[in-house]
Image (cartoon, grey):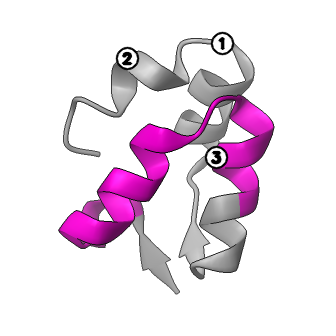
Amino acid sequence: MASFNDLTPEQMEKARACKSADELVKLAAAEGIELTDDQLEVISGGTWYDCMNETW
């Protein structure tokens, strides 16, 4: 499985377009991306969008 560190530019754009944490988690699953516990914690904490601007 891929991780967020392996996102293509197209996948990153799709992730940035997500309007909610649920959309982001669903996108990750659909793209075969494995989220770490730390990433899931950030997403569930509501700060996921800020992290999309950082390299995971």
Mark 1 or mark 3: whose residue is earlier in sequence: 3
Residue 22 is situated, as x and y percent measured from the top left of the image, at 80, 40
Residue 32 in which image quadrant? bottom right
Q: Residue at x 65, y 62 (%)?
A: 27
Q: In this rendering, is residue 28 above or below 33? A: above
Disc marking residue 19: none
Q: Residue at x 66, y 38 (%)?
A: 40
Q: How many numbered markers are drawn?
A: 3
Instruction: Please indicate whether residue 52 sits to the left or right of residue 2 in the image.
Output: left
Secondary structure at badge 2 equals: helix
Q: Residue at x 54, y 13 (%)?
A: 47
Q: Main secondary structure of the magenta part?
A: helix
Res 12 visible:
yes
Between marks 2 and 3, how big is the CA–CA gap?
A: 13 Å
Instruction: Please indicate whether residue 13 sits to the left or right of residue 14 in the image.
Output: left
Mark 2 or mark 3: whose residue is earlier in sequence: 3
Q: Say which amino acid is labelled 1.
A: Gly
Instruction: Please indicate whether residue 41 sits to the left or right of residue 22 in the image.
Output: left
Q: What range is drawn magenta here?
A: 4-26
Secondary structure at badge 1 equals: loop
Tell me the residue that label 1 is attached to. 46
Residue 51 is situated, as x and y percent measured from the top left of the image, at 36, 26
Q: Say which amino acid is labelled 3.
A: Leu
Tell me the residue that label 2 is attached to. 50
Between marks 1 and 3, how big is the CA–CA gap?
A: 11 Å
Secondary structure at badge 3 equals: helix
Residue 45 in which image quadrant? top right
Disc marking residue 24: 3
